[in-house]
Structure formats: structure tokens, C-alpha cells
């Protein structure tokens, strides 16, 4: 009987429960999915290093306001972890090291209302090849430096159109993970037998970079010298001879050299003088541009400590590993390289007919002079080491000159003040100079102003092209080498540095093209510290 009562109660409860509708399924909310359409046929994307990458996608969720969606683009891989942007469409410059393997380019969209996310991955290949061009060192913070490579019609052999221009930005920091510690004061590009190197120097740092390995640092400071330095290094000018055999660095005022004929990675000990002393401090020097035929001197240096000139002896002489104290004078005996007076040397550069121009200032009279050294002299057989002296008392604003330049193809001295470039024809004892370029000019109704010149250089080794006015309104194309000047400027208002290419209209006349139509301007830099031509062979 009890069993029947229990069974009846159970069946009654089961019947009662079946009278209620199951509401559990109605607690589920169905969301519209996030969607990404990228209009691409492949997930592989290729971009040249330094170029702008644009990836257009359409990310959405039906029924949801776009304002409730957030976007994120990231680049990952090969040591890089970069936030590229937070817009639906990616539009940014890609500046990471070139790599044969792909980076991961990640796009993520987030529904902020419900916390839903959707991601898509692309394989990004960063390609390119560093070609010949103009290397530009600059600073944006006044404490560190970076290097950029400009490839264009003016500086690169196979670039024939203005639109072929390409700038590889930040090639040092991109490939080394940080800026140069300090302000670059000199650079040199060495192309030897089977090797290619770029050396850079700040006031206390010297490094060798490998352009064949993305400008990565190969060696630094004491790694580059056979005898390590104790204490801080004070690095001066870097130099090289275009025809070999030496590569030179000045450290603590002493000259150190290494050969270019094979990949010698270390500089020797500081050169001693021909009297076997080391009593000198070099601030300016220049090697000859051509290999000597015999026992002619190989170059000239200025010893600021003793206010005298010294000679690089012939590479064939017994004293080839020393710096020579000059033995001879000028033909009239009045110009003695060992006793130029109370002077400072501002510049040594190439002159015509195998000569060097040395610009000096007499610290007593404040007069500027140019001594023309004869590199055909052996400093042994005759008094002919100095050809002549020029007095620059007919050169306007020479006392304000901040940069000088010259070349072996013409008897012209170029000098720049803060706002003008002058040319002086070196054919008389008192050459006259005339302004040929102004940092402020107007072109196509646009006025260029607030520009201050910081450096000029006659470009004699970049294998590009330059245009000058021809006859009948035509344009004539010349090789860049020896036919153009680079004028470096800085604008204190915009904090922008520029390189302006100014064509030389006619060699040996001092005439440059003064029509801004033929100038070519490369901008977007910080304060430019140094420029040099970069060769790959």
C-alpha cells in the first residue's frame, strides 16, 4: 500500500513539472560576427625598406556602430615588436631590417561593447638593396646621430629620372637597434679589393660598419687599433686616398694608418716623425688624389701644436711609415712649411695640376691666405714644395667663412658663410671672390628663408647626373662628379636640415647655376652633421 502511495505522489509531481515551459533557451543572445575583408588575393605582402606600406581592409560588425570597434596593427619577428597604428587602414613607413624571411603583420579588430576580437595575420617581406648614393648623418636630439642613404639621379649611376629618388631612412638605428652615441663629425667610405666598409667618428667614438650586412657595426674603438688606448679617445678626421694604399684616422692628434689592399681591420700605432719624435697634433690633412709615379710626397698635414706643415712621404721611400718634417721651401725661399708663422689651418683640399690648397689664417693680422703645395715635389732635390701664396684680402666675408671646398679640376676656392656661397678664381696673388648662391631664394612663387648654411662640398666622386641650362632654352645633362656642389642648410624655425644640389655651370670660371629651377633639394633631415658619397664598388 505504501508503495502505491509513493508511486502516485511521484507521478503527480512529474505531471505537474511538465505543465511548465522550459525558458532556458531564451537566455542565449546571438551576436553578429566580426568580419574582415582585405581585398587581397594573398596573405604575402612585399615592401621595400623605407617605403610606405598601405593595406586597405574593411572590418565591421553588422548592427554595430564603427565607433565601438578598435583596431590594432602590429609587426612582430626577427627581434622587432612594433605598434604600427590604430586605424582600420594601415598607412605607415616600414623601417625594419631587410630579411629574406617574413615578418608577421598582425591586424586585430575588437568589439569594445562585448569584448569580441578577430585577428588576421599577413606574411610581410621587407626587401631592398642598398645602392650607391649620398650618406647623410644627422641629429634630432642634439646628443645622438643617425645615418640615411639618398639614392637619386644626382648621386646614383643607374637612376635616370627625378622620380627614381629613394631615401633609406635611419640605416644605422634600424640595423643596430639604437642611434650612434654622440654626434657624427666625419664619415668615410672605403672600397678595397674584395671588401667594402664605412667608417664613422664622433668626438670620442670610431666605428667600422659593414654595408654588405645592412650597415651593422663590425668593430668599435679599441677593437680597431693594434695598441689599445688608455682613457678617453679624442677622434679627429678620417681620411683615405682614392687610389690607395692607406686608410687614415686621427686619434688624440696622432695619425694612424692601415692598408686598403686587403681587409686589414686594425690601425697601426701612431706615426712618428722623421726625427723619430712624436711631437705633433694633427687637425687637418689631405692625401693626394692620384698615385705617385715615384718618390713624390703623398700628402700634407697641419700640426696645430707646433704651427707647421708636415708631409706624407712617398710610399716607395725608406721613411714611408713616418711623417716627414719638410726639408725644402718654395722656390724663392720665402715660404717655409716649417715656419708659416702664428697661423691656424682651416682647410686642406685638392687644387689643380696635382696640388693641394691649404687655407690658413694669420692669428695676428687675421688675414687669410692659401698656400699651394706641389705634390710633384719629392722634397729632396729642389725648393719647390710650395708653388705660391694667395692673399684673400679681396674675398668678401672671408672672416665669416664656416666651410671651404675645392677640387682637382679647377683653380677655384669655394667658401660659405651662414647665408652665401662665394667662388674665388685662384689665378692672381689677390684673388677676388663673388657670391654665387644665397640660402634665401624664390622659386615658382615660393620663398625659401630662415636657412643657415652649415657645410658646402664640391662633389667629385658620386656617379650621378646633374642638369644645367643649355643653349636655346634646352637642358644639358652632365656627370655629377666635379660638376655640382652640395649645400647643407638648417632651419632653426622648422628644425629641418636640407641638402641642396647646386650645379657648376662651367669649370675653372667660378660660375655656378643661379637659377633655382636647376637646384635639387633633399629634405626631411634633422640638423645635418656630415655628408659623404657612398660607393658599392
Image (cartoon, helix red, strand yellow):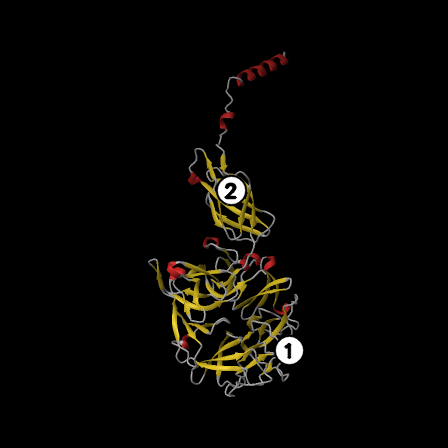
Is 127 placed above or below 365 here? above
Q: Residues within 10 Å of mark 1 (few under 14, many from 20)?
A: some
Disc 2 crowd, CA 10 A, few/some/many (<14, 14-19, 20+): some
Q: Is residue 250 left or right of residue 414?
A: right
Residue 322 place in picture, x, y as percent: 63, 79
User: Horizontal and vertical percent for residue 44?
Assistant: 56, 42
Where is the N terminus found, in terms of image quarters?
Answer: top right
How far apart are the alpha carbons under marks 1 and 2? Answer: 66 Å
User: Which element carries disc 1, helix, strand or loop?
Assistant: loop
User: Horizontal and vertical percent for residue 99?
Assistant: 59, 51
Q: Which mark is residue 162?
A: none
Residue 449 x/y as whole percent? 36, 64
Q: Is residue 448 above or below residue 396?
A: above
**For residue 424, above or below residue 160:** below
| Residue 108: mark in rendering | 2
Foreground tag (1 vs 2): 1
**Residue at image mark 1:** 320
Residue at far left of view: 445
Label 2: element kind:
strand
Q: Quadrant of residue 229?
A: bottom right
Earlier in the chain: of badge 1 and badge 2, it is 2
Amino acid at each position: 500500500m505504501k508503495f502505491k502511495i509513493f508511486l502516485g505522489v511521484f507521478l503527480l509531481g512529474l505531471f505537474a513539472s511538465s505543465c511548465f515551459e522550459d525558458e532556458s533557451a531564451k537566455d542565449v543572445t546571438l551576436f553578429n560576427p566580426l568580419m574582415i575583408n582585405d581585398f587581397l588575393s594573398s596573405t604575402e605582402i612585399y615592401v621595400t625598406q623605407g617605403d610606405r606600406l598601405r593595406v586597405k581592409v574593411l572590418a565591421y560588425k553588422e548592427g554595430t556602430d564603427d565607433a565601438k570597434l578598435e583596431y590594432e596593427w602590429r609587426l612582430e619577428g626577427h627581434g622587432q615588436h612594433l605598434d604600427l597604428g590604430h586605424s582600420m587602414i594601415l598607412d605607415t613607413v616600414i623601417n625594419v631590417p631587410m630579411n629574406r624571411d617574413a615578418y608577421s603583420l598582425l591586424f586585430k579588430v575588437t568589439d569594445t561593447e562585448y569584448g569580441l576580437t578577430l585577428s588576421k595575420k599577413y606574411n610581410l617581406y621587407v626587401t631592398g638593396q642598398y645602392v650607391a648614393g649620398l650618406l647623410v648623418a644627422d641629429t634630432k636630439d642634439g646628443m645622438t646621430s643617425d645615418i640615411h642613404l639618398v639614392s637619386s639621379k644626382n648621386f646614383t649611376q643607374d637612376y635616370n629620372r627625378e622620380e627614381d629618388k629613394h631615401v633609406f631612412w635611419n640605416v644605422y638605428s634600424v640595423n643596430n637597434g639604437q642611434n650612434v652615441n654622440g654626434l657624427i663629425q666625419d664619415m668615410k667610405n672605403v672600397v678595397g679589393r674584395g671588401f667594402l666598409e664605412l667608417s664613422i667618428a664622433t668626438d670620442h667614438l670610431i666605428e667600422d660598419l659593414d654595408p654588405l650586412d645592412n650597415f651593422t657595426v663590425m668593430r668599435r674603438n679599441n677593437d680597431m687599433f693594434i695598441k689599445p688606448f688608455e682613457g678617453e679617445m679624442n677622434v679627429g678626421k678620417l681620411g683615405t686616398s682614392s687610389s690607395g694604399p692607406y686608410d687614415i684616422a686621427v686619434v688624440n692628434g696622432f695619425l694612424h694608418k692601415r692598408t686598403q689592399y686587403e681587409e686589414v681591420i686594425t690601425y697601426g700605432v701612431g706615426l712618428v716623425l722623421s726625427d723619430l719624435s712624436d711631437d705633433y697634433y694633427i687637425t687637418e690633412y689631405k692625401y693626394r688624389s692620384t698615385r705617385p709615379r715615384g718618390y713624390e710626397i703623398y700628402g700634407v698635414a697641419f700640426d696645430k701644436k707646433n704651427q707647421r706643415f708636415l708631409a706624407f712621404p712617398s710610399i716607395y721611400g725608406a721613411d714611408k711609415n713616418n711623417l716627414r718634417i719638410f726639408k725644402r721651401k718654395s722656390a724663392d725661399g720665402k715660404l717655409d712649411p716649417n715656419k708659416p708663422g702664428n697661423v691656424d689651418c682651416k682647410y686642406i683640399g685638392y687644387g689643380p695640376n696635382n696640388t693641394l690648397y691649404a687655407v690658413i689664417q694669420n692669428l695676428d693680422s687675421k688675414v687669410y691666405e692659401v698656400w699651394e703645395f706641389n705634390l710633384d715635389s719629392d722634397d729632396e732635390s729642389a725648393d719647390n714644395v710650395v708653388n705660391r701664396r694667395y692673399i684673400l684680402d679681396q674675398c668678401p666675408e672671408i672672416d665669416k667663412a664656416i666651410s671651404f671646398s675645392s677640387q682637382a679640376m679647377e683653380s677655384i676656392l669655394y667658401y660659405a658663410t651662414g647665408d652665401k656661397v662665394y667662388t674665388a678664381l685662384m689665378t692672381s696673388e689677390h684673388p677676388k671672390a663673388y657670391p654665387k648662391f644665397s640660402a634665401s631664394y624664390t622659386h615658382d612663387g615660393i620663398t625659401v628663408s630662415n636657412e643657415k648654411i652649415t657645410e658646402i662640398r664640391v662633389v667629385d666622386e658620386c656617379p650621378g647626373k646633374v642638369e644645367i641650362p643649355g643653349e636655346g632654352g634646352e637642358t644639358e645633362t652632365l656627370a655629377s662628379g666635379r660638376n655640382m656642389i652640395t649645400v647643407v642648410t638648417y632651419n632653426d624655425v622648422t628644425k629641418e636640415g636640407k641638402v641642396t644640389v647646386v650645379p657648376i655651370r662651367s669649370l675653372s670660371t667660378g660660375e655656378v647655376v643661379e637659377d633655382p629651377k636647376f637646384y635639387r633639394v633633399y629634405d626631411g633631415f634633422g640638423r645635418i652633421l656630415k655628408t659623404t658619397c657612398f660607393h658599392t664598388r
